[in-house]
Image: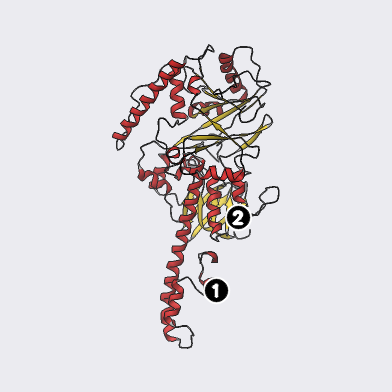
Amino acid sequence: MESPVRSSVIIVGAGISGISAAKVLAEKGVDDIVILEASDRIGGRIRKDEFGGVSVELGAGWIAGVGGKEPNPVWELARNSGLRTCFSDYSNARYNIYDPSGKIFPSGLAADSYKKAVDSAIRKLSNQEANHDSELSEAPSTPKTPIELAIDFILHDFEMAEVEPISTYVDFGEREFLVADERGYDYLLYKMAETFLFTSSDGKIMDNRLKLNKVVRELQHSRDGISLTTEDGCVYEANYVILSVSIGVLQSDLISFRPPLPRWKMDAIEKCDVMVYTKIFLKFPYKFWPCGPEKEFFIYAHERRGYYTFWQHMENAYPGSNILVVTLTNGESKRVEAQSDHETLKEAMEVLRNMFGPDIPDATDILVPRWWNNRFQRGSYSNYPIYFNHQIFDNIKAPVGRIFFTGEHTSERFNGYVHGGYLAGIDTGKALLEEMMEVVTRKNESQAFLLEPLLALTGSLTLTQTDAVSGLHKCEIPRQLFLSSNKLGLPEAIL
């Protein structure tokens, strides 16, 4: 068996964080990288699929936080790439709430129920703020009726901006845009990747530094470097590793660490909640739902919270597609993932017939993503409480020796969002560059110290001792000295 080739940096995971981190390194000349991706594509939780004749987004689907004074970096990427999007207005969803008999709740009742839910949520946040150093309290009032349960689901599982002071909306604006482009949301990642990875004219990445279907199962780390073993028995060595895997994967046993990660690190990782967010797509032979203005989103009020509650038609995104999407979360997501698509279709059709009558047509197709049972994801995104122990967050983000961590879960202000993952990758790439520069500086200072007596005794050198030492401190070491002493494998571009 051939000895593994050692590189400067291995990046585990080719989602938006991994790609953006790699781009930062490459732009600074650190192109001696390897990207190990467990699946057969890049994108991570940004994933499209062909369904009903159009491209649908199974994971991240919106660019959230648009229209403010500060530009959202992902929105800028989308604009520069000509990505097609549609504005999503959730504000009227509360007035399209159906009861199990198919009647829409009166707007006055819906507005009152919504105000009550918002007031309750604000009181809960106030209690949490007053007691954030102790155990968080429960909401002052618990929703009981179907409409209260439905609105509670919208507020908390959909993270409406009216309730929580979400940094995304504060910093970037309160508008959201649905990605509706046949090239897919992941087109943005391919555009980033082509700036530093060799890509064919049809957009396919051909660079052998990107290795797909490489499932990392063991990570050995020491003061001297990193060794990664993949499921197919391959071994990769590097000076540093950036782990761009989800918080769900870190909580699972997919990757074994040798030696184990320190207790402070694992305690922090285990305390982060993971949200499961499932968009179920249904294709119909024709439309039977309202499609006029302010009708894109509608809600089903059931006695069980989150039971096929939030619906959206895709006519604004793809006219004539005849596709409905229903969103489930957490417990309902896990329950549906464990059953057959046929059973899920049966449940969804029963709900739709309650809303729109018994004569509506059967769906001709269904698509059910399974993010929880996907061992490369183990959930949809991290879910930090509003008032969270900042030390725990810092511990989740902090490097362990030569292991650096990135992903949306390491973005304190924007966790759970695509731009959070994008910015986290940039931050991690910069942090690693700083670490590499510090190593070079320490090494140069050590070399200067060792050279001082040699230079003092060698009168034939053309350089003075002062000039030599000054040059070393400026990283102007001769190429021969660099090559002979660079045991860390640092790229010359960084010097």
Q: Which residue is mark 1?
A: 479
Circle 2/circle 1 CB separation < 8 Å: no
Q: Amino acid at mark 1?
A: Arg
- Residue 313 is drawn in which quadrant? top right
Q: Amino acid at mark 2?
A: Phe
Q: Secondary structure at mark 2?
A: loop
Q: Position of residue 133 (x, y in %)?
A: 30, 38
Label 2 crowding class (10 Å Cα cut-off): few <14, some 14-19, many 20+?
Answer: some
Q: Which of marks 1 and 2 precedes in the sequence? A: 2
* Whether residue 223 is visible: no
Left or right of 178 on screen, residue 305: left
- Give the color scheme: rainbow, by chain, secondary structure or one colour: secondary structure
Q: Residue furthest bottom?
A: 459
Residue at x-position 49% and y-position 85%: 462
Q: Is residue 188 above or below residue 458?
A: above
Q: Is residue 75 above or below residue 120?
A: below
* Whether residue 152 is visible: yes
**Residue 377 bears which disc, if any?**
none
- Seen from the viewer's position, the closer of residues 457 and 195 is 195
Quarter of the image where the N terminus is located = bottom right
Q: Position of residue 304 (x, y in %)?
A: 47, 19
Q: Which residue is mark 2?
A: 196
